[in-house]
Amino acid sequence: MTNRSRRRKLLLAAVGLATLALVVAGCGPSNGQNSLDPKGVEAKKIDNLFWPVLIVAVIIGIFIFVAVAYCAIRFRRRAGNERPKQIHGNTALEIGWTLIPAVILAVIAVPTVSLIFQLNEDPPPDALKVTVVGKQWWWQFDYPASKGSTKVVTANELHVPTGREISIDLTACDASLPGGCNVIHSFWVPELNGKRDVVPGHNNHTSFTIDKPGTYLGQCAEYCGLSHANMRFRVIAQSPDDFEQWLSEQQDGPAVTLEDSGDAGELFSKTFACTNCHTTEDSSISTYGPNLTHLASRTVFASGSFQLNRANLIDWILNAPSMIPMESQDCRLPPGPGVTCVGMPSFTENTPKGDPVMTREQAETLADYLLSLK
Ligand code: CUA
């Protein structure tokens, strides 16, 4: 075998392997974030547009590849034709290859533009309104007060009823907190709808409608700092009855008050001043950290990064920055110039002078208290 044909075979084998790898990668088990496996009404509409456009693109792509390969082989350099016949400005060809793509794009634009408008239509009057606030690095969900009931503020798990449009206002500014504006994020639940940016100073809007109860995984899709990749959330779709029950439980006061929780209350509100950033007493207000009034009703915490269980929670309370990256070294210092505080501080490392270091026993007391907040 000559060197040249060996090289050609190697190249062909490499291209074949790469293609196979791509195909196999697309066949993996569902990871719950597959936008080609749409579950919401809006995602299905996007999917119904995606496939025809993809098919047209693939047909054109194959045609171009074949034409290029044919020309490269048929008109390759041979003895006697080192300098091929030069042609310039074939008018018919020029017009043809300008017009044909223009017509194809114009045809594809009709359903695309119409779907863009459809997805941005005003929500129907019976839609459930939720405000999503992007924070570093977790999501806050605000359910407005309705029918004499109070507002509900929760984190990381967005409960919604099935069969009803969920109309979502997206903001990176928490109006109820001084200095409550955050950086840009992007709200994305691949199986429910496309990405939508969450921008400081400009409220965006998105929506989804889910037919079947289930859990749908979401993810921040715009780089927003150290723990961008950990900024997850889940959409939990329930039957309308289950949802109403969940909402009314969230509207209740805490299962146990700080005052009645003995040592834990003291540790939470005084010793470690957790109340600077969290509340466990009122599910209707927003705070710098997640509202913990009904923490124990959630399945995950730390922006969906960890299962909510006693062992994980104790580790987190002791030294959260060791579990996900945060810029929280100064979080126990009073605010001031040069003090950066984003995320949950460690209570066992870099403890500022004069501030207490947390023992495992104290963390266990706090975890047991938090886990009683159903
Ligand atoms: Cu928030 Cu990336």
Image: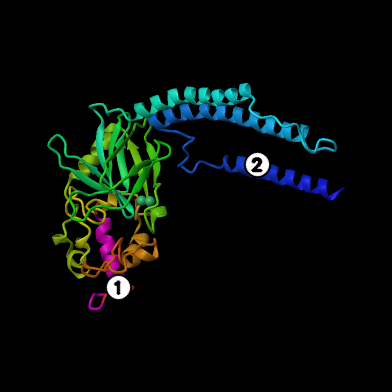
Residue 304 in view: no
Give the number of marks.
2
x then y, percent, for residue 372: 25, 55
* Residue range of the region highlighted in magenta in the rendering: 353-373
Q: Inspect the magenta stretch and tell me whether residue 154 lies in it.
A: no
Residue 315 vertical position relative to residue 76 in the rendered view, above or below: below
| Labelled disc at residue 5 | none
The mark found on residue 19 in the picture is 2
Return the residue nearer the eye: 51 or 278.
Answer: 51
Where is residue 302, by image quadrant? Answer: bottom left
Task: Say whether residue 366 is magenta.
Answer: yes
Amino acid type for the residue under numbered disc 2: Thr
Residue at figure coordinates x 28%, y 32% from the top left: 240
Other-residue count near label 2 (Cα within 10 Å), few / some / many at <14 / 14–19 / ≥20: few
Q: Nearer the viewer, mark 2 or mark 1?
A: 2
Kindly identify the residue that appears in the image at 54 percent across and 23 percent down. Answer: 99
Identified at 39% across, 59% down, the residue is 226
258 vs 324, left or right, is left
Identify the residue shown where x is 12% and y is 37%: 148
Asked which quadrant contains residue 256, the reply is: bottom left
| Residue 359 - label | 1
Can you tell which quarter of the image residue 205 is in? top left
